[in-house]
Image (cartoon, helix red, strand yellow):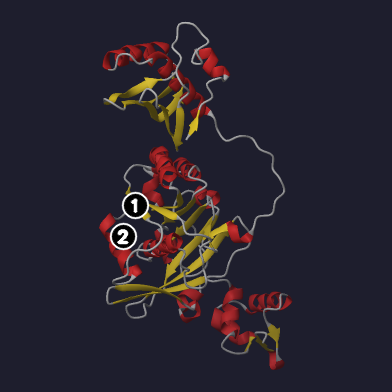
Amino acid sequence: MRRADAADPLATMAGLDGTAPGLLRVEAPEIQRLGDEWAATWPAHGVTISFGSVRENSDGIHGEMSVVSGVMGEIHWGRINLASTSAREGLVRKLDQAAPGLPWRPILERACRQAARDLRTGEPVVPLVPRQADEGSRFLLPKLLLAGETNVEFADGGSGKSLFALAIAQSVSTGIALPGGLVPSAPTRVLLLDYESHRPEHEDRLARLQGAGRPPAGLPILYRPMTRPLADEAGTIRAEIDRHNIGLVIVDSLAPACGPEPEGADAVVRTMTALRSFAPATRLVLAHVTKAAAEQRRGPVKPFGSAFVYNLARNIWELRKADEDEGADLVIAAFHRKSNAGRLYPPLGFRFTFHDGVTSLHAHDIGQAPDLLARTSLAFQIQKDLAFGAQTVASLVEATGSSKDTVARTLRRLRTTGKVIPLDEGRWGLPV
């Protein structure tokens, strides 16, 4: 909250500093802004004027205004053109009748003029200074969540992406590491925007992840059911992010968040731009894949929708479920498909176990799931195969399904980086 300067040129022009004739002097208001919501409070008069859903077009600056008296409560609510003199004069007359004796004209003039000025003000222009990012602060959660950016996790339906996202939320909110040594940079509040499920289901999953009889720990995971397109709700969400000091926003999922025609460029760009406006909070967006991509057996695929999903996201992971479930377990692999912060990371394997009402998450070697291993790079597959012992080029060709030339070329590349070494009798192995 801040106090406006009553001696600034705006106050003098409006006659609010007591120097201009015809207007009563009023104190400078206390200003509070949460996202797109803006409010001015005059404690001496017990009056708060707030604005929301403000939009500027060729007809002026329109927004919802609420006038609250500490004695009488809300005495006005409605839309107003902040730049319209006649609209303000009409409202002054109404307020004089509702709560006589207060200096409504200078209060209203100050509130409308300053709100318009503040809401029009974007981010300031600043110089770019060469400054290398600290690797520890670059990620909210190592590899998976690039801090302050839009991250996408995409998978076919039923692949465990919502459950995995909730495990990420629990890790980030408590500071407890995920398997594989993925330690959050700092505990932070999480906001889950849910387009697909409902609150009881998420609460049940969370209770099972925490374990029977264990009380919730860490900062809260906040929940909001969603039905309207994210771009239409962005102003309200920004206010909630500021109000609750949210560090991570999870959107489940992208297609309904885009609204009608989620595959179109316009819907995707509007949604990704809305997500970017949530900064400095980190964003994790869950997305789906096309039917053809879900059935693809090898190689990378891209999220469903416009190419702008891939182009505008800063960090993208593809999730795949193992075809052969290990009993009651759920085995998934996360494949790094895009990064704007450096190199791509090797695949990550995880295994969910479900027993006696408790859901546990463990690290898992995806080399034990042939269908998941087939989706990795040839270099990764070769190193996994060599982990079981030295092999010839012919045996690696048989194991990977790649051509002899491709395998030989990959081995030479891995040798130059010291990841494999040639042995006797044409065999290859891993360095000791």
Mark 2 belongs to which amino acid?
His
| Figure check: 306 above or below 25 | below
For mark 2, does the 10 Å Cα neighbourhood hold few (<14), some (14 to 19), or many (20 or more) residues?
Answer: some
| Mark 2 to mark 1 CA distance (whole Å) | 9 Å
| Location of residue 163 in the rendering, given as x and y in whole percent from the top left corner | 37, 64
Quadrant location of residue 389?
A: bottom right
Q: Can you say which quadrant of the picture contains the C terminus?
A: bottom right
Q: Which label number is shown at residue 223? A: 1
Mark 1 belongs to which amino acid?
Tyr
- Numbered disc 2: secondary structure: helix
Side of 239 where 127 appears, left or right: right
Residue at 48% in and 56% down: 152
Residue 155 shows up from this direction: no
Lower sequence index among marks 2 and 1: 2
| Figure check: 269 above or below 217 | above
- Kindly indicate whether the residue at mark 1 contacts the one at mark 2 (C-beta within 8 angstroms): yes
Side of 148 where 222 appears, left or right: left
Q: Nearer the viewer, residue 224 or 151?
A: 224
Quadrant location of residue 319?
A: bottom left
Residue at 31% in and 45% down: 227
Q: Provide the residue designation for mark 2.
A: 202
